Amino acid sequence: MLLAAWTVLQVTMTGQIVNPVHWSYSVEKISEDEVDLVFTARIDDKFHLYGLDIPDGGPVPTSFHFEPSEGYKLIGKVKEASEGETIYDDNFKMKLTVFSGKAVFKQRVKLLEEGPVTVKGSLEFMCCDNSRCIPPQEEEFSFTLKKGGEAIVSGGGSQAREAGGVAAEAAPAAAGEAAPVMQGQIDLQVQGQAVTPPSGTPKEEEAPSPTQPEKDRSLWLFFLLSLGAGLLGTLTPCVFPMIPMTVAFFSRSMGSRSKAILQAFIFGVSIMLIYTSVGLIVSLTSAGADFANTLSTHWLPNLIFFLLFVTFAAAFLGMFELVLPNSLITKADQQVDKGGMLAAFFMGLTTVLVSFSCTGPIVGALLVEAASGEVWRPTIGMLGFGVGFALPFTLLAVFPSWLKGLPKSGGWLNSVEVVLGFLVLALSLKYLSNIDQTYSLHLMSREVYLSIWIVIFSLLGFYLLGKIKFKKDSDLPYVSFPRLVVVIAVFSFVVYLIPGLFGAPLKGISGLLPPMSSQSFTLAAPPAAAVPASSGADTPASLCDTPKYADKLEMPPGLATYFDYKQALSCARKQRKPLLLDFVGHACSNCKEMETTVFTDPEVIRMLKDHFVIVKLYVDDRTKLPEEDWTTSTVDGKVKKKMGQVNADLQISRYKTNTQPFYVIIDNNEQTLGKPLGHTLDKQEFLDFLKKGKEAFDKQK
């Protein structure tokens, strides 16, 4: 009673009725006889609405009451469809779940009759700001639903939405009257012929993830790459000679042929399980939405990975050997001598341990690449590697006659290892580039990176011609035809790299290179509608003001962008344009590939420049923000103080994904327009994505 009297007094003293929460209603089709009733609350600035679950002694929770009817039944309870935040409420001296800006609630309903079914009820809610509370309010609602037909829900301030096969209507207003905007009863009216609403108004919290097919393709490609790495591992000098000895072990007369085949399969499966278990350990220890960003952008892991790759390269090039303790190998080998099915497992373990000096660098490089991606990538990568590595051993053990077709061991095996050394050395530069881009050091420009690659691959070509020799190499009396083919491929790649020094995009490998914005010299013609690569003190005409952080972050060639969400949203509202959110990362290879392949297309540039405001939201940038730009995460409750943390949390909390690139178009009310888009090199698909977003925005005008 005291609380109610106090809140009423607070409102009365203001001299006016305060109504900071504005409700709208819509219907979403689930199936032919099921729909979701959607209740959306728009909450004024500085106020917050309380959630459904409030402890005793607290404020009045948001609640929904439905009048019973034989025409429908409720499926479950009302659910919070948007993410709330937990705060300490000074008004009630307790931690409470609240919503700011917007709250969405859903109730699923099953229709039991064919004809129109009316769902009536009321909702009760309470809201407060930092100094006062509004007395609990109640609003009535009424939905008339029927199977089939099309309709628009309108009136009462609600947002029009087509139910998609389930028509929603209500009792019409009095003749000659427009549908009134009422604080109490909300009248929903079907007005004439149905009109399809803008397609781009799904709730931000429900934005569908468009990247699942892309993720599936990526995982399959990574599995195949890992399988190829496993097959390549069998061609190294310390593995290939083991194949005949291993086959001989299973072919010796210790029992029936079927028993030998069974042992061979156990041997192969054991190798797969050993490598997969390594990947599983990495997967379990690298879980967490922010792990990939931290691993791929922080200077310490990137420096460690660079040194690790250089170490592997040195081992491949003969500087030293990576070996495990002999005692470990001896113990595993002793178990093999005991025979039986268990011996097949220990034979597999011994094979893995003995081959470590050659496969260790490959496995290490594979795990580094896997751990910087999705959580399951290490497991899938090691499974693929294990399958590729075990397959030749197992097949030759089952079909020993195939051994006659294998080439003999020789100097070619060491050449394979040296080639791998050059490749690993070239890939190590990627991690130095990650540090340079993330911390805006501007030391590893695109020209420097390409110059080092040109030297590395030129040396590889001369090595294959026999002009350079390493420690374990034997004399090369002549160049064989297969070797010559590889030499031609290597020097062709060097020729392909050279134009990149002068600004050629090198689209085929753009994901492995520093971004084009780091190129300090170019002979290429500027793309259509070009703008300065960095705005500096001048503001491009397509922007409202000088972008924050333009002194640290580079604009893509041909486009003017913001780097701060609030600043970009403000400009989009001033210009009455949709806002394109570009979630990107300094260490994101697919992002660089998109900017080089898709964002350089003249039609894409014109579309973006003329009809959109763009904001590049780096999820891995380490720039510390001023305190007024800090945010408290609704996901983990932590305060985000750095640019990358704030942007990553925005993507995770609002769109339920942490993969990049990720593109979202929103309107001036921060509503999502159309389905978000992930990585694609199809320019037409990206153009269609932009056109649909623009059309949805135009329909709102």
Image (cartoon, rainbow, N blue to C red):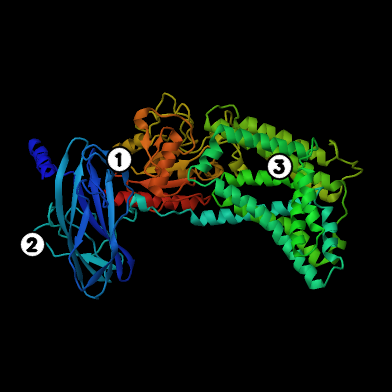
In percent of width and height, residue 327 lies at: 78, 45
Between 420 and 453, the one lying in front of the other is: 420
- The residue identified by callout 3 is 493
Mark 1: which amino acid? Ile
Q: Relative to 33, is 412 above or below?
A: above
Q: Secondary structure at mark 1?
A: strand
Chain-order first, disc 1 or disc 2: 1
Q: Is residue 297 left or right of residue 160?
A: right
Mark 2: which amino acid? Ala
Say if residue 134 shows up in the picture.
yes
Say if residue 673 shows up in the picture.
no
Q: Residue 479 falls in which quadrant of the image?
A: top right
Query: Which of the two marks, 2 or 3, is nearer to us in this view?
Result: 2
Q: Are marks 1 and 2 in contact (CB under 8 Å)?
A: no
Mark 3: which amino acid? Phe
The residues bearing labels 1 and 2 have C-alpha atoms spaced at a distance of: 45 Å
Point out the residue furthest to the top here. 537
Q: Residue at x 23, y 46 (%)?
A: 49
- The residue identified by callout 2 is 174
Q: Is residue 483 left or right of residue 230?
A: right
Marking on residue 87: 1
Could you classify mark 2 by the number of other residues whose Cα lies within 10 Å: few (under 14), some (14-19), or many (20 or more)? few
